[in-house]
Amino acid sequence: MLLALLLLVGAATVAAEGQCAGCNLPLKQEIRKQEVLADLKGKLGFDPSQAKPIPAKVLARAQAIARHSQRLRDDQDDAEVTEAIHVWGSQDEDEETNEVRFHFKTDVKGRAIEKAYLHVYIDTPESKPEERRGVSIMVYETNEDGMKGELIASHHVLTPTHAFAHHKIHLNADALERIAHKSVAILIVEAIDDGVNLVVLPGQIEDSATHPLSLELIVSEKKRVRRTPNFCEEDLPTQPCCVYQTVVKITELGWNRVIAPDSFPLTGCAGSCERAAVNYTMPPALSALQSAVGLSTCCHPTKYESTTMIYVTEDDNIVEKVIENIYVARCGCS
């Protein structure tokens, strides 16, 4: 009996809170604002609104540091994580053609090709092998009818006087990205000297472990999809638990010693939570009582994010500091 009464009182309290989870948002925002500002003052170690003005030279140096730090963050955001993938060319045995097939695997399809290179070996000419002369390595895409199509690359080299000469040719990445979506791409690779193709083709090599022609693709890694915060809309009382956000400007606070950022989002949780599911491990009477009083869960932060602040201390020292767990990034019910 006592357990039932305690459950009834607790459930009624939580239910009342759940029904009012989205009410009086301005008051909730003001309370949250004071909490965040007090937390920031504690982490900075002084009250920025009460500090003296910053000397001009110190301010100029702090602003330069802030600009440099922002550029570094922008570069980091723009940087692509890349991976090098090698695709070996192949031909049928005794195939007398300049066509080379490249079989693209699933790790290439659907990914952006940032750069593309063709590794080619050139043989020594049969006529006057001791004489070095110029020859152009030409790489073509093939049309649907198998004929020579668009020129992807042209690279002028000197013929070798002995053995083979290796060349790394930069290809048109846009064209390679287009044909890489196929299962098999066919390229025509030629370096014609006196009517003879000097390119060493796969079909001319007996050793299957040797790859005279290969593509090197620098592809962008698949980026992780970041979950978008469940931001609140204007009609708070009718929507589920969400993140509300308002922007606070440093100038409005009078924090003249905080150089960056010039503003920050003030975030918190609001909205309603669905009623808790019936606990089937409870005795039937208590389960019915829980359902009758409308037991609700609470909307609260489930993830926080940090920010970097650049500020000038009361001793005129410039500090760049990571302020941990200052933003509510996601809210949930429990």
Image (spheres, rainbow, N blue to C red):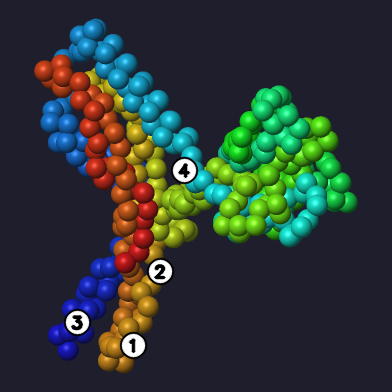
* Residue 311 in the image: above or below residue 42: above
> CA gap, disc 2 to disc 4?
41 Å
* Residue 192 in the image: above or below residue 315: below
Residue nearer the viewer, 194 or 297: 194
N-terminal label among 4 and 1: 4
Identify which residue is drawn at 15% across, 27% down.
47
Circles 2, 1 touching at the beta carbon (< 8 Å): no
Mark 3, residue position: 5
N-terminal label among 2 and 3: 3
Please give left or right for residue 174 compared with residue 16 in the image: right
Q: Quadrant of the N terminus?
A: bottom left
Residue nearer the viewer, 100 or 150: 100
> CA gap, disc 2 to disc 1?
18 Å
Which mark lies nearer to you, 1 or 3? 1
Which element type, helix, strand or loop, lies under badge 2? loop
Mark 1, residue position: 280
Which element type, helix, strand or loop, lies under badge 4? loop
Which disc, if any, is residue 274? Answer: 2
Mark 4, residue position: 81
> CA gap, disc 1 to disc 3?
19 Å
In the rendered image, the residue lying farthest to the top is 56
> CA gap, disc 4 to disc 1?
49 Å
- Give the amino acid type for the residue marked by disc 3 in the picture: Leu
Identify which residue is drawn at 68% across, 36% down.
124
Q: Is residue 39 in sight in this rendering?
A: yes
Identify which residue is drawn at 49% across, 43% down.
82
Which mark lies nearer to you, 2 or 4? 4
> CA gap, disc 3 to disc 4?
59 Å
N-terminal label among 3 and 4: 3
